[in-house]
Each structure stands twice: as C-alpha cells, then as structure tokens.
Image (cartoon, helix red, strand yellow):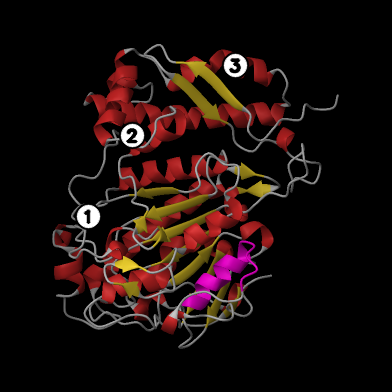
Amino acid sequence: MRRSKLNRRTALRGMLAAGGAATIPLPLLHSMLDDSGTALAQDGTALSPPYVTWFFGNGILPGLWRPSATGTGSQWTLSPQLEPLSEFKSHLTVVSGLEGKLVRAGVEHPSGSAAATTGAPLNGNSVRAASIDQIVADLIADGVPYRSLEVGVTPATPNGPQHSLHSVSHRGPNARNDAEYDPAAVFARLFMGATPSTDDAARSELARLARARQSVLDSVLQDGAKLQQRLGAADRQRIEAHLESIRAIEQRLQGAATGTSSQQLCSAPSAPNVGPDQRSEAPPAVNTAMAELSTLALSCDLTRVVTFMFSLPAAHVYYRHLADDMNDDFHDTICHGDAGDESSQPRVDTGVRYAMRCLAEFLGKLRDLPHGNGNLLDSTLVYVTSDTAWGKTHTAQDWPVLFAGKAAGRLRGDEHHNFEGENLSRALLTVAQLMGSTQMELGEDDGLATSPLAGIAT
C-alpha cells in the first residue's frame, strides 16, 4: 500500500484544560519526503540545510586549540582543546590561522565579536551590518514560523554598552536579537503558542499546567492517534520518540516552574529541574535544555536558523561547578590574571574544554535525530567561533573557527585547513555561499572579504 504523503507543516493540535491552544509541530517524516529523501513530497522543494551560530566568549589557548597537522582523515588529529569533540571528528572542519583584522585596541572584545559575526567594524556602540545568521535567514527562512531563534546558556554579561557585547545576532545597526536564557520561555514559545514575554509569564503557564496535572501533549493525543493511522511503522516510531522527548523537557521545566521536586511531577525521578542560570555559571542542565529545545526547533522546521550563545563576549562567567579553584571571574581573573602563555593557563584550559563538552552535547543531539536520508547533524551547518583568540592579551591571530556538520553534503568533514594570516571575514563569506548565497563579497573596510576559503566546500 502506498504510504500517505504529508505536508511539512502538519502539526498536532489541541486545547489545554488550563486554557489556550497547543500546537506540536512534527519532525521531518519519511511520508513528507519524495522517494530520494532529498526534497518535499508535495511540491519537490529541496531540503534546505539548517544553520547554527554557536558562540562562546573569552577565546581559547591557541597553542592547545590548533591541531598540529593539516589534512583529512588520519592525516590530522584533534588538538587538546578540541578533544572533547572526538566522537564528531568526521563531522568537523577545523579552520586555523585566520586573523580578526577588525580588532581595535581598547575595544578588543566588541570589535572582535563584530568581526567574527558581521565582518564589519563598529559604529559607535552598535554594529554596522547584519550578522551572518541573519544573512542566512534571508536565504532560507521563508515559510517557517520563526525567522530565527536566539537562545543562551548564561546571561553573565561583560562591561560596556556595545551591542556586540550583549548579542551576536543583529538584523542590522541598532537592531540586535537578544537571546532568551530561560528554557521555560523558549518551550512556551515553541510549543504553547506564546509570544516572547517575560520569564515569569512562561514559568507561570508551565506551573499552571503542572497544578492541573496536564501536559501540553495530553491535549493533542486524539489528533495524534488519527494521524498515526495514516503512517508507516518507521514514521509512527519517529513521532513517538519525538513526543517522548518533548514530554521529558516539559516535565523538567514544570518542576522548575513550581519549585517542587521532579519526583512529585515526573515518572522519571532522576529528571532535573531546569530554571535559568541565576549565578552566572553556565550550568550543564541549562545547556542540556537549550540544546534539546534548539534541536527540536530545527527538526520540526519551526526555524532554520539558530544562534546559540553559550556565553557572551567578555562574559563575567564563573565556572565554579567545574573545580574548587574555578570560583573566580573567568574573564577578569582567570583569562587576564593567570600567569602563563598561549599553551599554559590551566584554568583557562578548563573553561575552554567545558565549553567544548557543551558543544559536543549539542552536536550529539543533532546527530541522534533522523533527518532526510541521514541525521540532523549531517544536514546542518554549525559555525563555531568566539570574540578573541588568546584572551589574556586579546590576540587577533589564529582565531578559533570550526564548521561542524556536513551541510547536506556541502562539507566533507574530518578536515583541518590552515589559512595563515587570512581575513576572518572569509569564513563568513564561506558560510554564506555554503548556505546558498551568490554574493561574492562580505564585510566592510578592513573586514572586506572578496573570496571564500578555498577547498572548504565540496
């Protein structure tokens, strides 16, 4: 029997007992695809690779970040600071040697953040151009509920009024997209039809559902049962796994919203409560929640563009949960104050490796979700960068740049390329062209790039 073909926008709908409507979008199912698995069944539209900017503040230790050899496959090995990403080596394209040519004395972090995401210098306290995520959104965001989604793990903020310190997503001058740091607010926006509002409102709505002993999913079960009658076994299993993952997130967030224990609310007593980071420490549980929510948003085509701000430029973050000696301001005391050179600041190394472990968790969630003929990591382009190279002296050379994922075959993966002294903006132009842009230049002034990085694209 020929399977039923579904519209990509098919969703499960219902009414909440607590009031309001619930809409649960679906992941990409086999029944939504053509026989090749590369285009939508209904109109033949080719699948667009999702895009993510994954940003971490305060830079790296270049001597421990840069792999010792270039090449592909067995020709190169991961550096010590990239070792947390070892299980994803086949999906990594490491780019070394780039220089942030827009970095200016006295405003190193703001100008570095702008260089790494817009390719243009600052105009006073603001950026002068749209950031790369918004350039990509112009290419691929038509027809999705959210043009882009901006989430963050910690709101730990830097000193200074520059917009490029407080967000790395910008629609243009004086038009930044601030991240949402409360997982409950992101959940409410994605799955409960909520518009961006206060954190308290999102937690209140989840708490109301918890008191009513109701899940968002309870309201759509009838609609889901009807849909599953039309699907093959693989798609039914895919929907069941999708709904289970949403329920697990919801249960943890409801526990955080009510202040009660997860054992009182959840069938799985080990599920943690997840509220926003209120101690400026980028806790693992918040990273997990934001990684799950971002992955679901991409999988369900709620958005095709995510900016994931692990930490802001020059963030005064405290990684006190990592070790007894990490209870200091990572920017002021550890990066700038600790003795050592580009290979020997142990506490900086601890912080960078933690950021990479958190990135690995996100990549793992992308890999674990089926998408088209492969998984979501195969299909996605993740651009990873920071606001400086070596944080202690704000160096502009050997800027950290990674491309993770294979962008639906547009990247090979498992490669290290060196472009000694080349303009950082060439990485941005490479991203734009990988995502389908025909533009031949990107950036302004010293940040102008007129050619992409050679040999990166397939």
The secondary structure type at the circle numbered 3 is: helix
Residue beneath disc 1: 156
**Residue 438 included in the magenta stretch of the image:** yes
Residue drawn 32% across and 44% down? 286
Residue drawn 58% across and 63% down? 90
Disc nearer the start of the sequence (3/2): 2
Instruction: Inspect the image, locate mark 1, and give the three-letter code of the amino acid beneath it.
Output: Ala
Q: Can residue 120 be seen at all in this image of the molecule?
A: yes
Instruction: Inspect the image, locate mark 2, and give the three-letter code of the amino acid beneath it.
Output: Ala
Question: Residue 387 placed where, x, y %?
Answer: 33, 70
Residue beneath disc 2: 184
Disc nearer the start of the sequence (3/1): 1
Instruction: Inspect the image, locate mark 3, and give the three-letter code of the amino acid beneath it.
Output: Asp
Residue drawn 46% across and 30% down? 191
* Residue projecting furthest to the bottom: 421
Magenta-tinted stretch:
425-439
Question: Dot 2, how many residues are within 10 Å of its Cα: few (below 14), some (14-19), or many (20+)?
Answer: many
The secondary structure type at the circle numbered 2 is: helix
Q: Main secondary structure of the magenta part?
A: helix
**167 or 350, which is in the foreground?**
167
Q: Quadrant of the C terminus?
A: bottom right
Disc nearer the start of the sequence (2/1): 1
| Left-right relation of 360 to 347 | right
Residue beneath disc 3: 223
Q: CA distance from mark 2 to mark 1?
A: 18 Å
Q: Is residue 245 above or below residue 362?
A: above
**230 or 199, which is in the foreground?**
199
The secondary structure type at the circle numbered 1 is: loop
